[in-house]
Image (cartoon, rainbow, N blue to C red):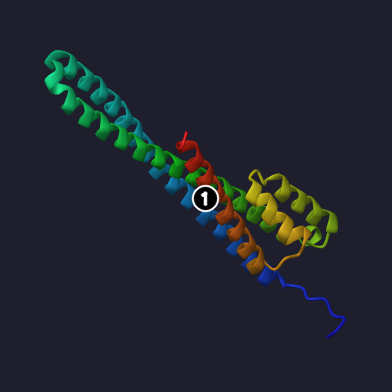
Amino acid sequence: MAGEEFSLGSKEVQQTILILNLSVAQIDLSITEGDNSVNTLIDSFTYMSRHIEQIQAFSLKITALAGESAQTLQNELQSETSELASKMNQAIVAFQFYDKLSQRLEHVSHGISGLAEIVSHEMRIKDASEWEAFKTSVRQGTTMREEEELFELVFDQHTPVEEAISIMKERMKRRMHEAEDVEDEDELF
């Protein structure tokens, strides 16, 4: 057994391709569902934002019409709308996270589709240049810092997947805390 090469039979290759294609379909459907939900949320937040602006404008008009007696009410109203606007900004940041998630899933889907394409052709699966071209295509599809770093860990440094995931989680956690520290410093000024 020591010199034998492992090869999949045509039935195993067909099953592998079916599973890869199923994975691509699941990813694509998840992205579509997520996009629909996020688009609804974006529409809702846009609507709320317009109404916050109107509430702020009305509160200024009330103060102008009622004079100084309405100033306290106007201040409270401005405080409430400011807090609501702040929460909406936090939600927008969450939408940006979703956008990154969608991009990553699209890149994974592209990679799995490319893999299924190579595996489906007997001549291509044995051609080293096909695999290098595929690897280059996957690398060129990395548009985010974390994707590139993960690619380097797995492909260039041959780090086991579990370890690479752990390393990336730690890096991302550290960067998130660094970004929060910068935001906190900005608020001090």
Whether residue 182 sits left or right of residue 154 in the image: it is left
Picture quadrant of residue 5: bottom right
**Percent x, y of residue 19:** 58, 64
What residue do we see at 20% from left, 25% from top? 74
As rendered, which of 189 and 148 lies closer to the eye?
A: 189
What residue do we see at 61% from left, 65% from top? 166
As rendered, which of 34 and 58 lies closer to the eye?
A: 58
Does residue 157 show up?
A: yes
Picture quadrant of residue 119: bottom right
Whether residue 62 sits left or right of residue 90 in the image: it is left
* Figure check: 80 above or below 122: above
What residue do we see at 42% from left, 39% from top? 92
Whether residue 19 sits left or right of residue 155 in the image: it is left
Q: Secondary structure at mark 1?
A: helix
**Percent x, y of residue 185:** 50, 40
According to the image, label 1 marks what residue?
28
